[in-house]
Structures are given as structure tokens and as C-alpha cells.
Image (cartoon, helix red, strand yellow):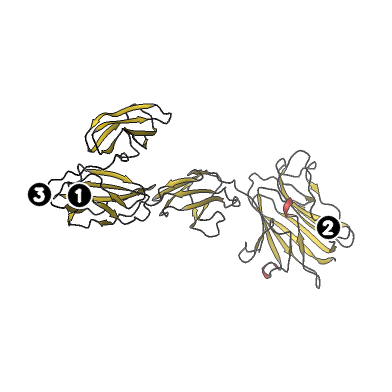
Amino acid sequence: MKKVFAGKIRTFCRTALVASCIAVFSISASRAENDPILDTLAADDATPYMEIIIHAASGDSRQKLVFGLHENASTGFDAGRDVLAPPPPPSNFDAKIHFDGEDYLVFYKPAEIKSHSILIEFHPEEGSDAVLLYWEPDSLSNGWDYQLMDTDGGDTFSLDMQDIDSLSSDAHDAIENGLLLVIRPELEVPELLAPADHLENIYPDSISLEWSGISQAAGYHLQLSHHADFDSLVMDTLVHEISYTFVGADYGTAYFWRVRAKGDDFADSPWSTIRSFTTIVEKPDPVLLSFPEQGLQDVDPLPRLSWEKSNRGDFYELQLSSDSEFKDPMIEDQISGETEYQVTVPLEKGSLYYWRVRSGNAGGLGDWSVVWSFTTVLPTNISVIELPEYFSLKQNYPNPFNSSTRISYTVPESGNVRIDVIDITGQRVATLVNEVKSPGCHNVAFDAVGLSSGVFIYRLKAGNTTLSKPMLLIK
């Protein structure tokens, strides 16, 4: 199957950087299937900066128009490098390139390598087929952008020559009588600098995005998305600096971003590599207390305090005090995930107590709940001393801690109690208690001055009972 086409092509180089040139291209030819449509123009001692070769064929004959820049080319005709136009082949097939009155195809090197705009006019003979241009996209030189568009500069028609391999003059009304071949060097690709790729737990209030500058860039195209394929965009904007402050990001959300350089005389660069970052989760909502209700009377001296689960809460901190300002809490403990707390040391009967709870997660601690109060039951005439029924060892508070923390424990009967602190190698680093203790609730402070950050075990031994818990020292 052969494609027959006929017509005339005139090309005019319209750029301040290249002197005017005219080519007259008369065609009456057929193109065979699978015919190679691009020859590589060899250079003995250098690689072209840019090269485009547009072909037409007639039987076994082939002709081509060559436009290009050669890194070692001179600013005038160089007989050793510039290629003379071949004589016309048979079958009424003609091609000429005119440059400064001479007939040759030129690799021309201007003072500055910027955009080239070449006008191609179509003048098909009456009754002839449309003019066909064809080329090999994969052989176009890298680092350049090649666009074919209408003579108004792409107002109604524009295509990328690296995406297709041919174009007919009847493909669009706007190019029926001619089109522009615009060749521009691509800008270098910006390098993303900050934040680091895959960075997590960024506070979303104000995030600074930074990248390397490109000297010829007129600006930068920045995109952010929740997806690595950028099928939907959170932001799509033009920036004139080499950084951008992203305000109003969502908590606990992954973002992907990329940048490309934008040019005037130069084509836009390819997109940069894609980076991602994740914002920190939002702090938990305030806790709602459940029991004992605000102002409740006759509460058991060993109450079970409870509250509702906090949104986004991973753990809870509880304080109970006889002082509404919580200057010296009687109970100050951390609870992991549970929404209740059993008081194990009897509170004084007929007394007023205040309590509050807050929740925390990786984003920090939420606000304290509203403070509630309750009053324990009044004492009877018979004084009953309520003692712990078993040994217990509470979680140290605070935990993690910096230098000092406090450990609470209960003793059901008089006897020797020993509490040691052991490092992860099994070595004892401190003995906090080693003496006879009376029944009741006790606590002891641990000062970790001189110790390095790490995990430690504190262990209680009393008679046949051994209890232990871990704690984390962070300096």
C-alpha cells in the first residue's frame, strides 16, 4: 500500500539568532511501507546539540530537510562540516535550501542557543494530495523540545513531535496553508532539596518546600497531590522563587510533590523526581469524664474512675488531688488505652477530691478535661483500717522521663521490701528500697543522673513476690 502525495513546501527560518533561509520543496512521490524515514547525520568529532530531519520519498529516492545546531559549527558556511543540498532526484522531485544566497543545508551555531521558529508554507498543486511530513521521534536529540503548531503560535493547534511521527497538511483547518516548527532547548531539571524524602511527623501549619534554582528559568511549576501519579491535585501553581511555603496542610496526611522549570526562550524542563512527606497526626480531643459524676456524694474510698474514649487518643494521663489546682496530686498516673482507673489506696473518708484526665498520641498531649469533684462517704463510729490485699507495683510517672521519676507500690503486710533498677544487660544500677515496710501505699523517687538514655527495669522483691516493670529514660 503506497501513500501518494504532491505539493510544494517553503520554509522560512524566523529567528533573531539565525539568518534568513528559504527552502523550496516540490513533491510528487509515493512512500513505501516500513520505509526508514530518518537518517542519522553523522558527525566525526562531535555530537549535535539539536537535530531534526524531515523526510519525503519518491520510489527509491529520498530527500530530507535538516535543521540543527552543532557544538563545533561555525557562524558561517563550513565546507568541511556543513552539508550541501543534493541534486534533485528524478521523477520531478526537487529540494533546495537557500542560506545567504548559497544552496546548502547548514548546521548553524548562533551566539546564543535559544528557540528557533521555522515557518513551513504549503502550496499543493491543484488536484494533488495533501503535503505529508514525517520523521522518527526516537531519533530526535535529547534535551530539546520540538513543537509543530499553527502559524499563530499554537492558538488552535499544537503537537509534540516526540509523541507522533507524521503530520498531513489537511490534519487541521488551521494548518492547511502552513505551520510553525518551533525548536527550543529544554531547561535543566530542578533538584528537590527540602523536606527530605519520606519525612514523617511534619507539623502542618507551615511547610517550606525548597528546590535548586535553574539560571535560565522564568519560574517554576509546583504540584502537590495525595497520590504519586498526580491524578488529582491539591495544588497546581506557578512560583517565581526557589521555595514555597505550604500553609493549611491536613493532619496525618501523606503528600507527594514535584517541580519543573518554566522558560521563555527555553522549553519547560521535565518534571523533577517525586518526593513525599507525611504530616503529624492531630492531638487528641479533650476527654469527657463519666464516673464519679460531678459533685457526687458518698463515693466509695476505693472508687473506679472512668471516662469516654478520646478521638485520636492512644494513652491517657490522670490526676487526682485534694487541691483544685493540682499542685500536689495524690495520684498521677499514665494509662495505656484503657478508659478507667481503679484507685488502690483508700481515700480519706468524708473528704472532697478533684480529678481530671487528658489524652495523648504522637502529635502530643491534648487539653485536660473539665475538672470534676466528688466526696467520699462519711466515716462510721467504728474505725476500720483498710489495707491493700496484695503487693502491687505501679507504672512509674512520668514515663518516658528525663533524669527523675517516681514509683508507687503497695504492701499488704509488714516485711522487707527491695526495689532495684536494672539495665538491659542485667546489671543493677541502683537500689531504691531495701528495708522493712509497713502495710499500705508507698512511693519512691528514682534519680537517673549519670545514666545514659535507654530502657531500664525496676523490680520489687518481697518474700515470695517478685514484680517488675520497664521504664524509658530519654535525655
| x, y percent for residue 112 | 63, 45
Disc 1 and disc 3 in contact, CB within 8 angstroms? no
Query: What residue is drawn where x is 81% and y is 70%?
Result: 128
Q: Is residue 6 above or below residue 424?
A: below
Image quadrant for the N terminus?
Answer: bottom right
Which image quarter: residue 13?
bottom right
Alpha carbons under labels 1 and 3: distance apart: 16 Å
Residue type for callout 3? Asn
Q: In the rendered view, does 2 fall on the left or right side of 348?
A: right
Give the class, few, some or many, for how many residues have Cα within 10 Å of label 3's Cα (few <14, many ≥20).
few
Q: Which residue is mark 1?
A: 301
Q: Position of residue 217 (x, y in %)?
A: 55, 48
Residue furthest bottom in the image: 127
- Place of residue 423 in the rendered image (x, y in percent of width and height, measured from the top left): 39, 30
The disc at residue 381 is 3
Disc 2 marks a residue whose amino acid type is Asp
* Callout 1 secondary element: loop
Instruction: Count neighbours of disc 2 (C-alpha within 10 A) and say few if under 14, some if 14 to 19, many if 20 or more.
Output: few
Left/right of residue 399 with respect to residue 184 in the rendered view: left
* Mark 1 neighbour class, 10 Å CA radius: few under 14, some 14 to 19, many 20 or more: many
Name the foreground residue: 156 vs 332.
Answer: 332
Of 290 and 356, the residue lying toward us: 290
Of the residues under marks 3 and 2, which one precedes in the sequence? 2
Question: Reading the chain from its start, which is encountered first: label 1 or label 2?
Answer: 2
Amino acid carrying label 1: it is Pro
Percent position of residue 247, x then y: 41, 53
Front position among marks 3 and 2: 3
Give the answer, above or below, for where 385 lies relative to 172: above
Q: Which residue is label 2 attached to?
A: 35
Q: Can I make out residue 475 in this image?
A: no
